[in-house]
Amino acid sequence: MAARSFLDRASDAVARFSGSITFVIIHILWFGVWLVINSPSRARPFDPFPYSLLTLIVSLEAIFLSTFVLISQNRMSRLAERRAHLDLQINLLAESEMTKLLILTRAIATTLKVPGAEVDEEEREMEQATDVREVMKKVEKEEVD
């Protein structure tokens, strides 16, 4: 996997921090101090009620945080897609190997005349190679339904 860019690492760090309890505590303290400093009982509040400056700052913060979280989620989604593709490749390889093992086991059992080694319909189907395109069509059809 390619090394993540500085922006990817930064957006992941911001998203991770914004989802922490530390982030919540900092905001509780920040809002509390802001409200105390700008309370109506103070002589000269710099942001009197309804706290327009605080609203602007929090709105801008929300815009940037949501963007960082979306960037991080998009990257994680791409990574999950790559992992799912790798899992599919591994599963197809394992299925192919199992089919070859079934065929080999059947040949050994037949050669050694092992009792009960008769081939039934289910075993014949299992010994057939899986048509990946057919499987994908079935999966896509189920997703639509």
Image (tube, rainbow, N blue to C red):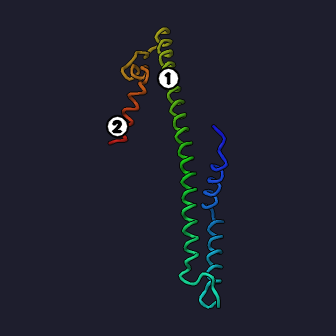
Q: Amino acid under label 1? A: Ser
- Residue 109 at what x, y percent from top left? 48, 13
Closer to the chain start, of discs 2 and 1, is 1
Crowd band around label 2 with a 10 angstrom C-alpha radius: few (<14), some (14–19), many (20+): few
Question: In which quadrant of the rendered view does residue 82 lie?
Answer: top right
Q: CA distance from mark 2 to mark 1?
A: 24 Å
Q: Disc 1 designates what residue? A: 96
Residue 10 percent coordinates (x, y): 65, 53
Judge from the rendering whether residue 100 lies leftward or rightward of residue 17; answer left or right: left
Q: What secondary structure is found at the residue carrying circle 1?
A: helix
Of residues 122 and 116, which is closer to you in this image?
Answer: 122
Residue at image coords 50%, 33% = 88
* Left or right of residue 30, residue 56 in this image: left
Q: Is residue 2 left or right of residue 81?
A: right
Residue receiving disc 2? 141
Q: Position of residue 91 (x, y in %)?
A: 51, 30
Q: Residue at x 53, y 46 (%)?
A: 77
Is residue 57 positioned above or below 81 on the image?
below
